[in-house]
Image (cartoon, helix red, strand yellow):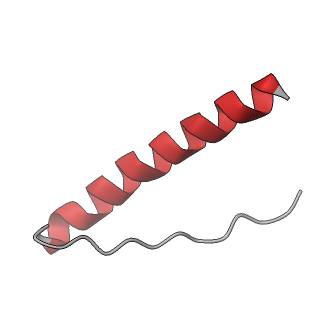
Amino acid sequence: MEKKPVISYQFVNVPADKQELVKDIVQRNLEGKMDTYFKKV
């Protein structure tokens, strides 16, 4: 299985301590979409 690239986001107007939280949510959303996609295949 190939390694996933590390996705880095930089959000404007988001405090530094919230950056990780937002990244985590976005990452989980992306993974959820990918899971749905792979289940259809």
Residue depicted at 78% across the width and 66% down the height: 3
**Which quadrant, please, contains the C terminus?**
top right
Could you tell whether 30 is left or right of 5 in the image?
A: left
Could you tell whether 16 is left or right of 10 in the image?
A: left
Query: Which of the 4 quarters of the picture holds residue 4?
Result: bottom right
The x, y position of residue 18, in whole percent, is 18, 61
Could you tell whether 41 is left or right of 19 in the image?
A: right
**Above or below, comparing residue 1 to residue 35 in the picture:** below
Query: Which of the 4 quarters of the picture holds residue 39?
Result: top right
Q: Which residue is most to the top?
A: 40
Residue depicted at 85% across the width and 63% down the height: 2
Residue depicted at 59% across the width and 71% down the height: 6
Circle count: 0
Residue depicted at 28% across the width and 54% down the height: 21
The x, y position of residue 11, in whole percent, is 25, 70
**Above or below, comparing residue 5 to residue 18 in the picture:** below
The x, y position of residue 34, in whole percent, is 66, 40
Query: Which of the 4 quarters of the picture holds residue 37?
Result: top right
**Above or below, comparing residue 21 to residue 37 in the picture:** below
* Camera-side residue of 2 and 40: 40
Could you tell whether 7 is left or right of 9 in the image?
A: right
The x, y position of residue 31, in whole percent, is 58, 43
**Which quadrant, please, contains the N terminus?**
bottom right
